[in-house]
Amino acid sequence: MSLDDLNDRSDQNDFLSGALHGAADAMPGGEVDDLHVSFGVVRDRVRRRRAAKVGSLAGASLVVAGVLAFGVTQTPLWNSADPVLPGSPTEIVAPNRSADPTGEPSPSGPPATSVIQDGYVPSWIADLDAGLECGMPVADLETTAQGWTSSSSGDIYAVTSEMGGEPSTSWGMSALVAGTGGSLDVPPVLVWSQDGVVVDLGTNVFDGSVMSAPLLSSEGGDVTEAQGGAFTTCAPVETETVDNFATPLPEGDYEVRVVAFPQTASGAFATAVSEPVDVRLDADGAHSATGTRGGAATIEPPQPVEGELSRFVLDRSTDWVSARLTQFGYVTTGTPVVTAECESADPADTVSIEMVQPSTNESFASFEVRCDGERFVSPSVVGGGEEVVDIRLASVPDGVARFWATLAPNTGGSGGNGGEAARACSADGLDLSFDPANLLAEGAGAKAAAIVDAALACDDNELIGLANQDGTELMFGNETAEQTFALPDTDSRRYETLVRLLTGTMGVTSGQSGGVPTVVWPQVATEEFRDSADAWQEVVDAGVLTQEQADAQQADGTYTGMVIGIGEDGTWRYYSATD
């Protein structure tokens, strides 16, 4: 793309930007902020759903791995009609639980049978005609779907929302369901029992629930999620028309089974029941037995920072596993980064993590974290669709003792996660400066100085703000400012290139946009200096090109490196490559 093309497109962008701003200004009441709040309320009223629907597989083999999410809350009754508003993150307190799985019920919790209604059958279970009821002997909970099996395949974990009001927590567990002769069209559920008695039949998965992947897994292949309510479905609140539940299971030791509901060729639903898994429920959450996995750990998750969005902490350093995803807020503006640490018996182990948009079950960023105890910092994460973000641990080796990951704003070197990202910046440590007096155009010089200062500080938020303020065309218009200035940039070296171009090469006037001349760096990118030996040597001396690169491009007659254009009025017009 030529400099004339860049200037023409910049002119068009200026016109469109002005037109849009004018239209927005003409809208009565300044509704932009009001609409933003309204969208947040609507999002909070939308029930979390996963978008990866598993279709019917009649007469064929089907293998699915599932997450079983069963809710427990700390409030007496969660009012789902109220919107959930973002709040400040709370302090993370280390779990205080016994490291000796004795199998005895927690002393503070009454028997679960004391809070359930014996013989109660939730309406959707009654519709199945599967012979299931609350208080039934767990020995009678059997597989009735011929050719089908269920098994648990991961640790139980918590998903906690702390976005205003009292925290709300649900449970999840990876599972594997396989079979032939029918189809599995709804997620499996998590059925709890204690002392040989069924005390929770799981949530209603026949209300439009769809399948998705677990948030904690060591299994590969196809995965699915089972839905769960916030309370035991064996303790109904008396109503005339619908099933309502408001009672959490008390603290204690339980057996948990995966129960799937395949539909047979005749259209009837049957059950596929797994072997039991021991789970301890206490004040710190629900815990699977660690067994031979994990080990000693020394790394510690940091306290939440202001604006933190999500964090996942996995601890296998005691005899009971603790795993929790905590969500503090929505992705709205800015460029968050993922910071993580992992410690394993084998330092060569890696944990695969994904950032997931819950409404679509789409992963919009993924990373590999080495378990060598060194802190990992991702490039800026773009995506999330202005909603909460799930951190999914897609693959966790058995040797992992402790792991944590956070999604939080990149503060650009002022501390927290942003400080880590800043150290992974190509301009870090450059001893260069820009003198605005080198330019006759005062506006262009001031903007160039501001760009250099932000790049040298590795401040992606400032660079993004400068570019978005001026509508800067970046990488032929194919990238957003968030993408162009994502950190770390050790591969693209765009921060370093900005600094070297503006401090090490001369800016010359070439072209105009909207009647305002454009100052271009480097001068060899302009037609006037294309054949100048001094101009070619300038980009080599500045460190923009190697001598070999400069010789090859000069032989072709065209500079194809990065170019910066700033209007004499101080408008940053473009930062792109020429062709």
Image (tube, rainbow, N blue to C red):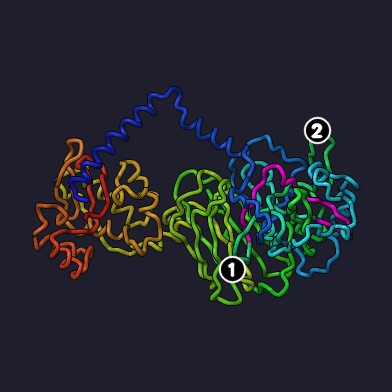
Specify the segment rendered in magenta: 192-216
Amino acid marked by disc 1: Ile
Instruction: Using the image, tell me which numbered label, if any, was put on residue 469.
Output: none
Assess whether residue 510 is covered by the magenta stretch: no
Front residue (pair 461, 79): 79
Q: Which residue is at the far top? A: 28
* Residue depicted at x 65% and y 55%: 57
Residue holding disc 1: 299
Q: Left or right: where does residue 443 sit relative to residue 261?
A: left
Q: Left or right: where does residue 530 sit relative to residue 202?
A: left
* Residue depicted at x 58% and y 53%: 390
Q: Position of residue 515 (x, y in %)?
A: 17, 36
Tell me the CA gap for discs 2 and 1: 51 Å
| Label 2 SS | loop
Badge 2 crowding class, 10 Å Cα cut-off, few under 14, some 14 to 19, many 20 or more, is: few
Amino acid marked by disc 2: Thr
Instruction: Using the image, tell me which numbered label, if any, was put on residue 241.
Output: 2
Q: Position of residue 74 (x, y in %)?
A: 74, 47
In the depicted structure, whether residue 293 falls above or below residue 450? below
* Residue depicted at x 63% and y 63%: 217
* Residue depicted at x 17% and y 41%: 512
Q: Position of residue 513 (x, y in %)?
A: 20, 39
Which label sits in the foreground, 2 or 1? 2
Dominant secondary structure (helix, strand or loop) of the stretch shown in magenta:
loop
Q: In which quarter of the image is the C terminus?
A: bottom left
**Residue 54 visible in the snapshot:** yes
Q: Position of residue 418 (x, y in %)?
A: 45, 56
Front residue (pair 405, 207): 207
**Residue 427 visible in the snapshot:** no
